[in-house]
Image (cartoon, rainbow, N blue to C red):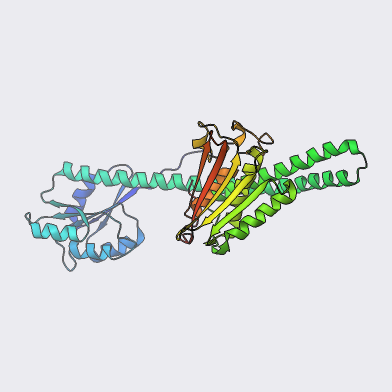
Amino acid sequence: MTPTMPPPVKILAVDDIAANLTALDALLAKPGVEIVHANSGAQALEVLLDHDFALAILDVHMPEMDGFELAELMRGSKRTSHIPILFLTAAGEDSQRAFRGYATGAVDFLFKPIDARVLSAKVDVFVQLAQQKLQLAEQLEAAQQLLKTNEMLMAVLAHDLRTPLSAIIASASFLGRFGGEEKIRPATDRIARSGQRMARMVDQLLHVARLHGGRVELLPQPEDLRAIGAAIVDEYEASRGQQCLSLDTSGDTRVHVDGGLIAQVLQNLVGNAMQHGDASMPVTVRIDGTARERVVITVTNGGVIEPAMLPHIFDAFRSGASRTTLGSGGSDGLGLGLYITRELVVLHGGTVEASSSAESGTTTFTVTLPRECCSAQRAIRI
């Protein structure tokens, strides 16, 4: 496939004397650069509507509308306000005139007779900047397209995998209830656990794709973190037993957040603690609402994270399985739970930290949330 040529960098040259425009053509002509002429301020305004320019070279002395007036009109329009302006004048050096030129938005002010080398060097700078801007725009467009493709792939993958996974889990449940053979129960239990673990992996991959694509949007509303925490603790107690978790709250636990996303944060932290923590020690969830501007959530479990791993605990695809003290064992996912947790907390304008003490034999995750999450934050930057 033949590569497409990049569009030329366009320079607007405005002068009421045709010979001056011809001289600029001869001086500035080079591959990839197009000089567009205008012989008056009025004609320049018309041309500016049809082209995007990297630089405007304006003669100061023109009838009806001089270069200063044209520059003021350009600065007053959103479409043309960003175009750098280079003034040329045949008048002698005058500090007042130069000051007016810079006041109207000039990036430079040259006096005739123009040193060709100086003008060419200055124009080259703006040409290179424009070319770099075009390259960055193309790279950004390609990256965005790749991001959309990846997100679509993850969505299709998640959708297509959920159906067979649901069938596997349902079939395992059916065999466990009605299979009649006690000897097959361990196998059906393993199938069910593996299917549920795969379903969590699919959900994590889909969520990461949405985060990378900036598709996660905050829907803040009044919430009570005490109620959110109690619901999650009750859910785990129902499946693991009442001695595995404890919930302590103090102060005002009401906040203005996206309740669904914060529930996911807390569920990820509790699930991580239950899976990787020391099974002989209960997991403690504390919600401290005594401060006026923020609420602090801590999740503490038994077990110690290796010091070398602690700085990377929130990185994507990092598993907690390398802790020095483990609970029930192996990794239960792709190492995305804590990564997702951090991104959702940051989305709310908060922070999350991990600390681990060999002396106490415990690990604590601390989430600090503002009571009013920043409504201007809408998406994750990766």
Residue 195 is left or right of residue 127, and the answer is: right
Give the residue furthest to the front. 360
Confirm whether residue 60 shows in the render: no
Q: Is residue 66 above or below residue 186?
A: below
Q: Residue at x 55, y 36 (%)?
A: 360
Q: Is residue 348 above or below residue 301?
A: below
Q: Nearer the viewer, residue 320 or 160?
A: 320
Confirm whether residue 50 shows in the render: yes
Q: Is residue 315 above or below residue 349?
A: above
Q: Quadrant of residue 94?
A: bottom left
Residue 220 pos. (x, y %): 54, 62
Q: Nearer the viewer, residue 163 or 133?
A: 163
Give the residue furthest to the right. 180
Residue 32 pos. (x, y %): 33, 44
Q: Quadrant of residue 327?
A: top right
Q: Residue at x 17, y 43 (%)?
A: 118
Residue 202 pos. (x, y %): 67, 45
Residue 161 is left or right of residue 338, and the answer is: right
Q: Residue at x 31, y 43 (%)?
A: 128
Q: Residue at x 34, y 56 (%)?
A: 52
**How many badges with numbers are in the image?**
0
Q: Nearer the viewer, residue 117 or 146?
A: 146
Residue 153 pos. (x, y %): 63, 46
